[in-house]
Each structure stands twice: as C-alpha cells, then as structure tokens.
Image (spheres, rainbow, N blue to C red):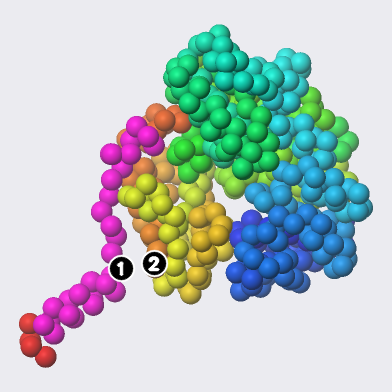
Amino acid sequence: MFKKVLIANRGEIALRIIRACKELKIPTVAIHSDVDATALYVKKADEACLVGPGPVAGYLNIYRIVDLARQRGADAIHPGYGFLAENPEFAKACEENDIKLIGPSSDAMHKLGNKIVSRQIMKKAGIPIVPGTLERLSSEDEAVAEAKRLGFPVMLKAAAGGGGRGLRMCSSGDDVKRFFNIAKKEAMSAFGDEDVYLEKCIDSPRHIEFQIIADNHGNVIHLGERDCSIQRRHQKLVEIAPSLLLDEKLRAEMGAVAVAVSKAANYNNVGTVEFLLDKNKNYYFLEMNTRIQVEHTVTEEVTGIDIVREMIKIAAGERLNIKQEEVSIRGYAIECRINAEDPRNSFVPTTGRVTAYYSPGGVGVRIDGNVYVGYNIPRYYDSMLAKLTVRGRTWEEAVDRMYRCLDEYVIRGVKTTIPFYKRIMLDEHFRRGEFNTNYIDQKIDELVYQDEHDPKDLVLAISAAIVAHSGL
C-alpha cells in the first residue's frame, strides 16, 4: 500500500478521499489556495500545504503539484474530479516522476479524453456509437454537408469537450454556419483544442452511465447503472441508481458493453461509460469518463462497495477481489447536488457567508459536503456545496425520504437549489419515472416555488412591527 497520498483537489471530494485513506491507514497531504486555507478538508488531512498564489492557478499547476508530492514523500496522487483529473499531461508527469496517479494511465486518458479518437476506437471494437462524424471538421461547408447527411437536428461538439462547453444544437444549415466558429473558439478557450465534430441529436434520450472497475491484472466488472437524465444545460442535477427504465436483461447487456468499452481502451482503475438511451431502448456509447464521478455515491449506496477505496487499492497493484456475480443492487438511491445557485434567477451562482447550517439525518441518509456555519462561499469554484444522497428499499420510499431530507436541510445566508429539488420530488412525472434529458427545460415553469424564509427573519419582522405600533 502507499506510504502517503497527496490529494490534488479541494472541497467535498478531497474530504471523501481523506476518509477513504484514513480507513486504509494511509497518511494524506492536502493542497490548498489562499482562499481554501481554512476549508474543512484542509483541517482533516494529516498535512497541508499552499499550492500557490491565487484561487485557481495552483490547482492546475502540474509541476508544482508533482514537486510538492516529492517534497512531502507522497508516492501517490489522487486527482479527484475536475481540475487535472482527466489531464493526460498530468498523468504522464506522475509516471515520469515515479508517482502513482490513482486513476488510469496517461495513454488511456489521452485516447478517451478526445471524443473523436474514442469514437474511432469504439467503432472499430463494434460498440454502438451515436451516428456522426469520425474525423475533425475542417470547415463550415464540410460541417453543413455532414449535418445534411446525418439529418437535422445535430449536435456540434468539441472533441476535447465536457460539461456542455463547446456544444451547440443545430436545427438547420444556417445554425451550423452560425455556431461552427463559436463552438471552435469556446472549445479552444475551455480545453486548448479547437477541434469539433458532429453527432446526430437523439430525440428525448435518457442519460444512462455504467460504473466500471478494472484492475491491472485483466479483471473488469461493472457496478450497474445510474440515470443522470435530470440535468440543465448538460449539467447533472439529480442522479439515480438504478434506472427505472432498465430491466435485468437490458442491464446485463449494457453492462457487458460497458466492460467491452473498458477493454477496448485497455483501461484500468475506476471509470464511467456513458450512454444515450432512445425511446425504443436503443443505446449508444457517448463517452467514457476517466475519473471518479460526482454521483458515485448512489452506486456505493445500492451496492455497498466503496468505490474510492477500490481506486486506491487497484492503483497500489492489488487485484480486484469482487466478481461480477457478487455485485448485487439493493433498493434505490437518489443524489441531489446542493448548489449555491438561485433557480428562480436562471440558476445564477450565489456567494456569501453561511449563517445557519443544519443537515438532515436518519436511516439511509448521507451527506458529502464541505460546508459549515461561518463558511464563506468563494466565487472562484464550482457552486456545489454538498451532495445529499438517500437510499430506500423501493423507489417510492427513496423519493419520500429525499423530500423529507430536503425539507429538513437548512442552509442560510445564500440561495440554494434545495427548494427547487423539493418541487421535483413532488412532481408526478418524476415520481412515475417519466423523465428524460429535456425534463428541466420542459418543466421549469411548473417547478416554481416561494422563497423559504428564515424563522429568525419572521421574529425580527414581528418585533419591528410591535415596536412601530407601540411608538417606542
């Protein structure tokens, strides 16, 4: 096992990794910016060090992070998600300095990080892919011609893309012309790669992803699927395991394909194979994420398998000691990403100081977060404050439990997505499992809610009214 693990990330995922390392009796080193100096994960690590000036640059400084690992005697680095987690140059720098990156090899990361290359690999391996181009588009005219061949609507996508950046839906040739250079510029700005390609737009799909675990000895299994269809602007909001749409036969078939995807890319460690599932239950490979996913919690809850722990053990060279037939799914789990955003104002991120915090509890309830009373939410990072995950024996029980927990959850000082999620939990279409990737866009006007006021505000208002009335 490793002597020491440096965590090249921040926030709740850094804290999640620290917990897994403590259970494995591995000392940890946290890195932090000036802004994060008093963050909870920094306090929980065995050691902590400033990664550099400024709130963001240090977390992206490959050679500074590698140097810190060497200085602190860390023989492994866990990248978490975001920042450098899927950067093949970072993985390569770790390999060249005899430091184990807890994740896949730089070669696998490079192959799968470029969507065009990964589509070529899957096509060759006989994996069903979304119809589209297999080479970079060199001009507007070529893009228009290919779009007409595929049939509108189409998705113009960045080859190195993710998170909805460098992506545009086009319903006509004029759309393709209008968005072609915009998508290229956005892709270059976000990923340092301007290549774009086209995919046929699948009508009202479900977004289904399979969690895989692969060791360095040829063993690969999947842990079932997650339904990540509840999303806005291609950003996931609510995640569910297992999907309400898949039966055992389709689950086994798609799971086998997910394993085949991993083998085709010579992949090792933990990864996620993402599919689009159409109305007729035809599935298409979308991409493979070469890191731990935000929503891994729901899979852990229904399988009882600690995915982060498995990542560390596999990176240390251990054999996977779980067989496919030993993986069983029990009940349902739902995760809500509690974001510091204002859903009634186009989900604009909000910042400020957390003046009150009370998290829910009880049977089947899990909180992954980095928030506490007095915490100042910085404007420099992702808006997610915490992840609320619940598990129930049935789908109905899981939904009811999530609503109860959201109703208990108190975060004051900033606007959050909590009241918005409460409306989703009450929506009959959601409760019947009738949703797809267009759910939020189609339902946004129905998911309205009134602001939830702090009881202290009411007390102050009443006191002020009494004072005014008495003339004091």
Would you say the magenta stretch is mainly helix, strand or loop?
A: helix
Q: Is residue 355 above or below residue 432?
A: below
Give x and y (percent) for residue 296.
62, 45
Task: Magenta stretch: give its range.
Answer: 440-468
Looking at this view, is 255 or 387 the one in front? Answer: 387
Q: How many marks on residues?
A: 2
- Determine the secondary structure under disc 2: strand
- Residue 257 visible in this rendered orientation of the protein: no
Q: Is residue 108 above or below residue 275?
A: below
| 229 relative position to 285: left or right | left
Give x and y (percent) for residue 23.
74, 61
Q: Is residue 102 magenta?
A: no
Residue type marked 2? Arg
Q: Which mark is residue 454?
A: 1
Q: Residue at x 79, y 61 (%)?
A: 64
- Determine the secondary structure under disc 1: loop
Between discs 1 and 2, the one toward the N terminus? 2
The residue labelled by disc 2 is 412
Q: Is residue 453 magenta?
A: yes
Quarter of the rendering occupied by the N terminus? bottom right
Q: Is residue 367 above or below residue 454?
A: above
- Crowdedness near tag 2: few (<14), some (14–19) or many (≥20) residues, C-alpha within 10 Å: some
Q: Which mark is residue 80?
A: none
Residue type marked 1? Asp
Query: How far apart are the alpha carbons under marks 1 and 2?
Result: 7 Å
- Marks 1/2 in contact by CB < 8 Å: the verdict is yes
Q: Residue at x 44, y 67 (%)?
A: 352
| 154 relative position to 411: left or right | right
Q: Residue at x 72, y 70 (%)?
A: 50
Looking at this view, is 389 or 76 the one in front? Answer: 76
